[in-house]
Amino acid sequence: MIDPQRSTPENLVARVRAVLPSLTPSAQIIARLILDDPATVARSTITELSAASATSEATIVRTARALGFSGYAQLRLALAAAAATTRQGPDRLVPGDLAPDDPLSDVIAKVTRAEAQALEDTAAQLSPELLGEVVGAITTARRIDVYGVAASGLVAQDMAQKLLRIGLSAHAFTDAHLALTSAVLLRPGDVAVGVSTTGETPDVVEPLRRAGKAGAATVAITNNPRSSLAEVCGHVLISAGRETAFRPGALASRISQLLIVDYVFVGVAQRTSEVSNEALRATRDALDHFVSDSRQRGRKAW
């Protein structure tokens, strides 16, 4: 359940977006009504909302519980707060989609707004306590393996590269066969991280399942807290990002996934400041010398 003391309009909106893909078709109708017009839903009795959405009152109650509330009454209170703080209308909750004939000025504005919203939603719903658990596990890990494919594979590579720079044994796997090979060889004291927007990518879900069985701590970075990936992982960090016609889910979520990676990286660097600072200095010096030597060799060749 959501703690009413910590619930905010921002993390309510992020929560609705996050669970939307995993809801039943009837529940998705209610969730979209919430995103489109929270004020109207907040003013509606359960009977009125049932008529407006053509769904049953039982479905409304189940949807409220899927969003983390004990029932519809508690959800209405949270929606009223969200509507009261939303002065920019429904677009505050759902940024406008890009159209084929949008001028580039609108493209700049809409993409910027969507990216900023994704970052805000991710920050709003991320639990510092849960982040701390993940940071703690990675800080003491013997090995950290990160799995992802396509755009999420780029995020996996970014995470492994960052952790490697501060002296940790981190590796990224974007190939399913290599991922499974890595996962089954992990053991207690290791950490496996899976990155998947939908949380249903088999190439990521299965390695995390195998890594958990091998005894490794498992972490999911996903948009969907009710996904298969979330179910097999001991820790779930929720990213945010809304899919549009010109921004598929993977692209829409990449920036928020990278934000989570940065949260983890900074947290680990803080806890290992002496070692991480020395590692950063050593790697920076090595790269600087390599670039300098390469330039000198290039001049001699001319």
Image: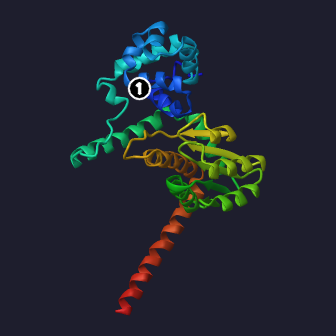
Q: Residue at x 54, y 24 (%)?
A: 67
Q: Residue at x 48, y 7 (%)?
A: 47
Can you see residue 140? no
In which quadrant is the C terminus drawn? bottom left
Closest to the observer, 134 or 90: 90
**Figure disc tally:** 1
**Where 225 sits versus 272, above or below?**
above
Across and down, in percent, residue 191 comes to 68, 51
**Where 287 sits versus 258, above or below?**
below
Q: Which residue is mark 1?
A: 35
Q: Residue at x 61, y 49 (%)?
A: 194
Q: Secondary structure at mark 1?
A: helix
**Where 281 sits versus 95, above or below?**
below
Q: Residue at x 52, y 23 (%)?
A: 26
Across and down, in percent, residue 71 comes to 56, 13
Specify whether 179 is left or right of 24.
Answer: right
Displayed quadrant of residue 219: top right
In which quadrant is the N terminus drawn? top right
Closest to the observer, 259 or 270: 259
Across and down, in percent, residue 23 comes to 55, 28
Across and down, in percent, residue 157 comes to 54, 59
Closest to the observer, 240 or 119: 240
**Where 267 sits versus 12, above or below?**
below
10 Å crowding of disc 1: few (<14), some (14-19), many (20+): many
Can you see residue 218? yes
Closest to the observer, 88 or 25: 25
> What amino acid is found at the position of numbered circle 1 in the picture?
Leu
